[in-house]
Amino acid sequence: MKTTASNITPAALHSLATIAPDHVIAQDYVKELATRIFGDRMESFEKLLPVFTNTGIEKRHSVCPPDWFNEDHDWPDRTQAFIEGATDLFKKSASQALDEAGLMAKEVDTIVTVSSTGIATPTIEARVMNEMGFRATAHRVPVFGLGCAGGVTGLGVASRLATAEPGSNVLLVVIELCTLAFRKDELSKSNLIATALFGDGAAAAIFSTRQPGAIAEVEYNYEHTWPDTLNIMGWNIDPIGFGAIFDKSIPHLVETEIGEVFESFLDHHELERQDLDRFVFHPGGTKVIDALETTFNLGQGTLNTEREVLRDYGNMSAPTVLFVLKKTLAKGIAGRSFLSTLGPGFTASFATLQA
């Protein structure tokens, strides 16, 4: 059993479940829908149309049926759809993670819920506690605003909470319903890119300092937020709903900035590049995946698992990296895996897992 210098037993990952909603929407349908809605209203639409092909996405999943996106929706509509969809995905993903870990809901001590695509108070975990059988005394930790970085940052938060209370069971649930941010009224490049990229999904995991039956040990967590980058990624919020902020400089930032932060991470934890056996990234888009392979000196095609997830699910924001991790675990991993995401802030979030 590994311990840190301060003799603290690290947390281990005991299960990981990924869930996508039932409604499947083909990229061809999204392209046709966007053409019908924006084609005559956006001056640069024809120039931007290839983004639907260049994303590498063939389909994505949605909590709402395709016809929902032909209608007008305001905050109450979107909020109701979020609460219903997130509640359903929470129950499904959490139940699967508990089953895989051999636990019952009443054995969970802390629930960490990560989401940035809807607002609900009471939060989602509170709405399902009685139905699912969680204890009334379970700690609730809802986290909002991490965006695409939420998968790895949430993993870090959940694992540190497990370490803080040795022997306790921590449930992490990451839910993003990105499709609910679709805007018919917004004639911007960011909105069109979001339309081409975003899908819905959820992931859940169990963490504990108990070692028997563990999949991997959570070793290190690390974050870096760049100054003066608030406009790189995030939401604009208005009476209609969320509006996506995407800066075209994201791939360039990956190529020029993340390498130095990665080296700082290695130095901080006294690691060498060769100490990392596997890389697991959030596949924000094909250009970002290409930039990551270049920046981290990985061969072309090394991140094909990331491309597969993007192809089949789109960019689901925070859960996406956990979908990649799930597929990686299914293929079998050994040694140390490096996880990385980027999100609003603008922030890089890293973690390492020991198989």
Image (spheres, rainbow, N blue to C red):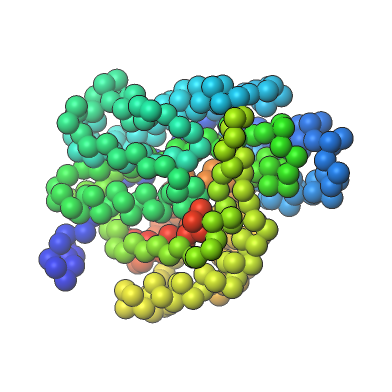
Residue at 64% in and 34% down:
182
Residue 197 spot, x, y in % from top left: 64, 45
The answer to whether residue 230 is above or below residue 319 is below
The answer to whether residue 342 is above or below residue 21 is below
Residue 12 appears in the figure: no
Nearer to me, 26 or 81: 81
Residue 185 appears in the figure: yes
Q: In the rendered view, does 284 fall on the left or right side of 205?
A: right
The answer to whether residue 38 is above or below residue 15 is above
Dividing the picture into quarters, in which one does residue 305 lie? bottom right
Residue 37 spot, x, y in % from top left: 79, 31
Residue at 22% in and 37% down:
139
Residue 299 spot, x, y in % from top left: 59, 71
Nearer to me, 75 or 40: 75
The answer to whether residue 175 is above or below residue 129 is below
Residue at 41% in and 54% down:
152
Q: In the rendered view, does 143 fall on the left or right side of 137?
A: right
Q: In the rendered view, does 169 fall on the left or right side of 39?
A: left
Give the quadrant of the C terminus: bottom left
Q: In the rendered view, does 133 fall on the left or right side of 115?
A: left
Q: How many labels does the image show?
A: 0
Residue 97 spot, x, y in % from top left: 33, 38
Residue at 20% in and 54% down:
163
Give the quadrant of the N terminus: bottom left
Nearer to me, 223 or 52: 223
Dividing the picture into quarters, in which one does residue 222 lie? bottom left
